Image (spheres, rainbow, N blue to C red):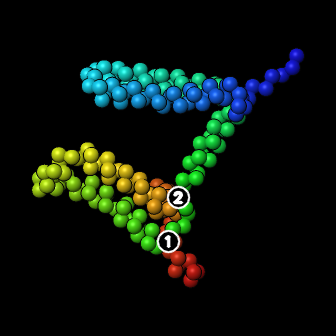
Amino acid sequence: MTEVDSAPTAGGWRFRLGIICFIAAFAIHLVTLVAMLAGAGPGTVAAIAAMNFALNKILLLATVALLGKSGFNQLKQMVLGAIGRYAPPQEVGPRRYSIGLVLFVIPILIGWVGPYLGDLVPLLRRYSVSAAIVGDIILLFSLFVLGGNFWDKLRALFIREARVVYPEKAAAA
């Protein structure tokens, strides 16, 4: 009796079917969006969303079953390799850093002050959802403009033991 290699290869049918399940697991949420845009009632949209949520979990389990550990690692390398090309550089110049900080701070300030300005500028209240979406996109874009070191600074906010070390203090020590 010979042992059959159960690891899917990148060109094999199990790997391709696993990729299809993985993509479908997230693409099914577009059905909810289409139902909302088509004017379906809230009950119908809720039922579709609940069904899609359950189907998402089933498809993700099927993806895991089809790919296995080695296939999942191949998929992860493919996805991270594609994203890695667009990753922000670690170091950025002073001009890019300044622009990134402005892009980072403006949506936060508008989000903070916006509700108070609603009475003074009624247009802000009328387009509040659109303005929030644009602000979120600008905020996310600013993180890429600011570079990889800024991601580390943000991450340090959530680590209690993290300490700030200023360049001039580090050089003196």
Could you say which disc has been placed on residue 53 in the image?
none
Q: Is residue 35 left or right of residue 159?
A: left
Q: Residue furthest top?
A: 1
**Residues at marks 1 and 2, CA–CA distance in whole angstroms:** 12 Å
Q: Secondary structure at mark 1?
A: loop
Residue 93: assigned label: 1
What percent of the width, then of the height, locates residue 171?
57, 81
Residue at 16% x, 51% y is 123
Residue ID at (46%, 63%): 146
Q: How many numbered marks are there?
A: 2
Percent x, y of residue 118? 15, 52
Mark closest to the chain's N terminus, 1 or 2: 2
Instruction: Count neighbours of disc 2 (C-alpha within 10 A) and say few if under 14, some if 14 to 19, many if 20 or more.
Output: some
Q: Amino acid at mark 2?
A: Pro
Q: Are marks 1 and 2 in contact (CB under 8 Å)?
A: no
Side (left or right) of 147 relative to 141: right
Residue nearest the viewer, comparing 151 with 158: 151
Compare residues 130 and 3 and report the one nearer the observer.
130
Which picture quadrant has residue 91? bottom right
Circle 2 sits on which residue? 88
Which is more toward the observer, 160 or 84? 84
Above or below, 98 against 48 in this view is below
In percent of the image, x 17 and y 48: which residue is there? 125
| Quadrant position of the N terminus in the picture | top right
